[in-house]
Image (cartoon, grey):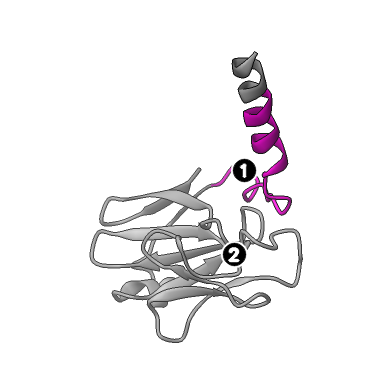
Amino acid sequence: MRKIVFVILLISVVLFSCDTTYHETIPYKKVDFTIYPNETMYWRLNTYGGHEYFTGGVAGIVVYRLDEWSFYAYDRACSLDWENPESWIWVHPNGIMLIDSLCGSTFNILDGSVITGPARWPLRQYYTRYDGYQLRVFS
């Protein structure tokens, strides 16, 4: 009898202690485009620490260049309020983090993780592949 009571109590605790502010992450959108970062139209990506904004994904895509071979690409939809069309992710003026224009959450530019909230989930990151000439961004 004690085991049954314990199991019922355990199930009750699990069911009723769930966070009611559960949020699904940014939805999946197929992304697949190629750019040539060395061309003058992408002059911001010609330097380390440079970034450029593109269309695609849920709310657009930001591409950041870390060094000669490393590029990072994130969806510009904030993980907190991705359904709000007024919420956009921007590269912070300090160049080392991303910031949501609406809620003020900040994210690490190297992995999309949350630095400060209210967002609790990381940004959606896309794959990048660079061969020294062309950069492919894809999901």
Label 1 vs label 2: CA separation?
18 Å
In the figure, residue 16 lies in which quadrant? Answer: top right
Q: Position of residue 4 (x, y in %)?
A: 65, 16
Q: Which amino acid does label 1 sit on?
A: Tyr
Sort mark 1 into few (<14), some (14-19) or many (20+) by Cα contacts within 10 Å. few
Q: Earlier in the sequence, mark 1 or mark 2?
A: 1
47 is higher (above) or lower (below) than 137: below
**At x 29% / y 59%, what residue is drawn?**
70
Q: Where is residue 119 in the image (x, y as percent from the top left)?
A: 59, 64
Q: What residue type is labelled 2?
A: Ala
Q: Where is residue 127 in the image (x, y as percent from the top left)?
A: 42, 47
Give whichever of 72, 5 is nearer the camera. 5
Give whichever of 33, 94 is nearer the camera. 94
Comparing labels 1 and 2, the label whose residue is closer to the camera: 2
**At x 25% / y 59%, what residue is drawn?**
69
In the figure, residue 39 lies in which quadrant? Answer: bottom left
User: Which label was assigned to residue 28?
Assistant: 1
Quarter of the N terminus within the rendering? top right
Give whichever of 39, 120 is nearer the camera. 120
Image: magenta residue range: 8-31
Report whether residue 41 is seen.
no
Q: Is residue 19 magenta?
A: yes
User: Which label was assigned to residue 108?
Assistant: none
User: Which label was assigned to residue 119?
Assistant: 2
**At x 64% / y 36%, what residue is drawn?**
14
